[in-house]
Amino acid sequence: MNTDRTLYYVHDPMCSWCWGFAPTLDELLAALPAELHLCRLLGGLAPDSDQPMPEETRQYVQRQWRNIQERIPGTPFNFDFWTLCAPRRSTYPACRAVIAARQQGEDLDARMTRAIQQAYYLQARNPSDPDTLVALAAELGLDTSDFATALWSEAVQQQLLDEIRRSRELGAEGFPSLILEEGGRRKSLRIDYVDHRSMLDDLSLN
């Protein structure tokens, strides 16, 4: 049996399509063969910014939320975010938060990602704000002092840039992306947002 197989999941914790994909992704990961190695990579949607999100962008993102609800029925969004928060087009802080959490345990990568998604899409909290990210770390039981230090460290920023570069080298063209690497060959899987079985079938053909 070939054990030299890696499935890369490229995402951003503030990507709304990644949020819509989350339930199906969970089903896919639960069904993966044991010999397949999973590697999560952060693609990084938007660099650090302290500028308010332009109105045109605000409207575009809200349209995306509605599109997702149509394409992936049952995906919840709390539109109060747009009145309760001061949105910024800045996802790098949330990406670094995932890396900073990962440093305290590999399982915290996925757990912090989901906490950020739930804060953003369900609780109308802004993951572009450091205070929100530190609060989420506390809710997950992390050492918040170490987390806060790592969040703005050069090492974590460099790790994020390395993952963004790696994602591009693999051929990720958007988020979410699933890329299978086997024996030096790579294959991008078609994302099925509502049924994990087609992606599982795709994997079994390799």
Image (cartoon, helix red, strand yellow):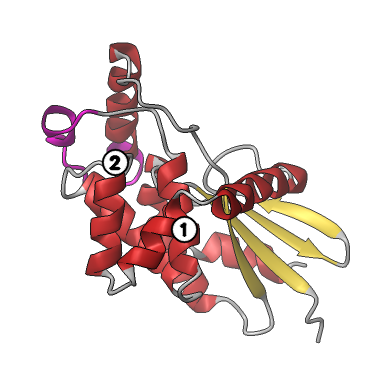
Q: Residue at x 34, y 30 (%)?
A: 64
Return the x and y of residue 196 as percentages of the image width and height.
Answer: 49, 63
To which quarter of the image does residue 39 belong? bottom right
The stretch in magenta equals 69-86
Q: Residue at x 71, y 41 (%)?
A: 168
Return the x and y of residue 22 as percentages of the image width and height.
Answer: 39, 57
Q: Is residue 109 visible?
A: no
User: Given the current orientation, which residue lies at the most extreme right position?
Assistant: 184
Return the x and y of residue 151 as percentages of the image width and height.
Answer: 44, 53
Number of marks in the rendered image: 2
Q: Residue at x 19, y 49 (%)?
A: 122
Q: Is residue 72 left or right of residue 4?
A: left
Q: Residue at x 41, y 27 (%)?
A: 49
Contact between marks 2 and 1 (CB within 8 A): the answer is no
Q: Is residue 106 left or right of residue 173?
A: left
- What amino acid type is highlighted by mark number 1? Ala
Asked if the stretch drawn in magenta spans residue 72, the answer is yes
Asked if the stretch drawn in magenta spans residue 157, the answer is no
Q: Secondary structure at mark 2?
A: loop
- What amino acid type is highlighted by mark number 2? Asp
Q: Is residue 183 left or right of residue 63?
A: right
Q: Is 50 rendered above or below residue 38? A: above
- Residue 150: which disc? 1
Quarter containing the N terminus: bottom right
Give the residue number, with chain letter if any, for mark 2: 129
Return the x and y of residue 189 as percentages of the image width and height.
Answer: 65, 53
To which quarter of the image does residue 205 belong? bottom right
Query: How busy is the neighbourhood of tag 2: few (under 14 within 10 Å), some, or many (20 plus)?
Result: some
